[in-house]
Image (cartoon, rainbow, N blue to C red):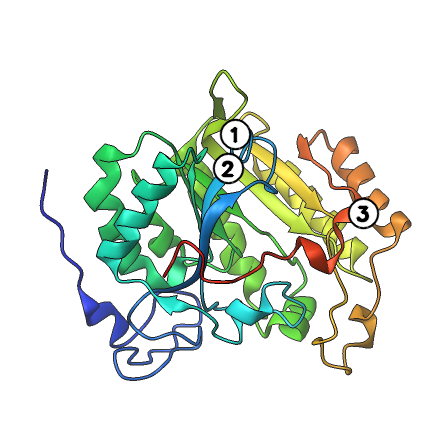
């Protein structure tokens, strides 16, 4: 096996995501809120992903701490913006991957991992020849294409969001007016890497890209534009879509965002699903019963410490 090593130099002037904050994360935090040692809040068998991702025992999910987006409505706010988690050095991360596989995980799912790319690449390369399940990269979509290129050959399934089409909306809710510019390029790179959808005999996705989109209040026209972009720029043999209906108006959402203080209506969600169907897109929808706080994972450091 080829020896691998971690270079912390990339953390000294960080440009891993589109923020390109250039923070020296070896001595302070970047825009993501993180330093140079990976942090995570939970590693477990997660049964509430799409049916092709969690099809048997559940995805072997590692929830990383920190995020480059900090969406004002994020259901995982306690880890994405508040920094809850524990340090997980890269060697320990490799052990966690193997332990999840031994526990029967359908795959190894990395949630919001990009700000720890150097360590994750090290951890995956160290055990890749011992993993018999796919590696799933679950991301908010705000990615640099060149960062995603580094994962070629290490990631089998990409699970990106495309959250926004409008730069006005992405600036308002995620302080990222350039969100769609970067997300669209990154998603096309993911599709290039994974190629046609490939399943095992149990319906589990072995290779491919699943694009997620969360419908949020008052933004159905933006959602419809995203469906149109997907139809115009992707191939149904390579991509599935997952239209999520789990938006929850949490108490922590600042009061100035009055439009986010309600649930998505049936009309809003159904109009997006109807457009996707008209466009011939394939994938998954979600029942409105999932829009509850109890569906947020209990971040208790289990599987980490």
Q: Is residue 198 above or below residue 292?
A: above
Q: Secondary structure at mark 2?
A: strand
Can residue 102 be seen here? The reply is yes
What residue is shown at x 65% (from left), y 72% (from top)? 72
| Quadrant hosting residue 5 | bottom left
**In the rendered image, which quarter contains the C terminus?**
bottom left
Residue occupying the point 71% across, 75% down: 253
At 52% from the left and 29% from the top, the residue drawn is 238
Tell me the residue that label 3 is attached to: 288
Q: Counting residues from the N terminus, which is met first, the one under dot 3 or under dot 2? A: 2
Give percent across and percent down for residue 45.
49, 43
Query: How far is mark 3 from mark 2, CA to CA?
Result: 24 Å
Residue corresponding to mark 2: 209
Mark 2 in CB contact with mark 1 (< 8 angstroms): yes
Q: Secondary structure at mark 1?
A: loop
> Looking at the picture, how far across and down is residue 4, in whole percent?
13, 50
| Mark 2 neighbour density, 10 Å: few (under 14) some (14–19) many (20 or more) | many
Front tag of 2 and 1: 2
- Spatial distance from mark 2 to mark 1, Cα to Cα? 7 Å
Name above or below for residue 242 compared with residue 88.
above
Callout 3 crowding tier (Cα within 10 Å): few <14, some 14–19, many ≥20:
some
Q: Residue furthest top?
A: 201
Q: Mark 1 — residue?
A: 238
Left or right: where 104 falls relative to 116: right
**Circles 3 and 2: CB atoms closer than 8 Å:** no
Residue 236 placement (x, y as % from top left):
59, 28
Front disc: 3 or 2: 3
First-in-chain label (2 vs 1): 2
Tag 3 or tag 1, which sits nearer the N-term? Answer: 1
């Amino acid at each position: 096996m080829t020896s691998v090593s971690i270079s912390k130099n990339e953390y000294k002037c960080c440009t891993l995501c589109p923020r390109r904050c250039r923070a020296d994360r070896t001595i302070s935090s970047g825009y993501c809120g993180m330093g140079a040692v990976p942090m995570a809040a939970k590693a477990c068998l997660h049964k509430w992903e799409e049916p092709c991702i969690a099809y048997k025992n559940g995805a072997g999910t590692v929830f990383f701490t920190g995020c480059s987006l900090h969406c004002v409505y994020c259901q995982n706010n306690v880890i994405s913006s508040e920094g809850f988690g524990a340090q997980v050095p890269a060697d320990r991360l490799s052990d966690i991957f193997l332990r999840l596989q031994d526990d029967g995980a359908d795959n190894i799912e990395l949630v919001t991992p990009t700000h720890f790319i150097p360590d994750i690449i090290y951890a995956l390369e160290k055990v890749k020849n011992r993993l018999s399940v796919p590696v799933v990269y679950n991301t908010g979509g705000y990615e640099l294409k060149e960062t995603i290129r580094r994962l070629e050959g290490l990631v089998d399934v990409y699970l990106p969001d495309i959250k926004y089409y409008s730069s006005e909306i992405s600036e308002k809710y995620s302080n990222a007016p350039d969100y769609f510019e970067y997300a669209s390029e990154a998603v096309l790179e993911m599709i290039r890497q994974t190629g046609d959808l490939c399943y095992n005999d149990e319906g589990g996705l072995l290779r491919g890209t699943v694009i997620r989109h969360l419908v949020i209040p008052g933004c159905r026209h933006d959602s419809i534009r995203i469906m149109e972009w997907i139809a115009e720029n992707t191939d149904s043999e390579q991509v599935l879509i997952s239209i999520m209906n789990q938006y929850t108006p949490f108490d922590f959402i600042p009061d100035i965002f009055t439009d986010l203080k309600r649930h998505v209506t049936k009309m809003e969600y159904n109009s997006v699903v109807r457009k996707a169907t008209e466009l011939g897109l394939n994938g998954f929808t979600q029942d409105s019963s999932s829009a509850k706080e109890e569906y947020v994972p209990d971040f208790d450091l289990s599987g980490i410490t």
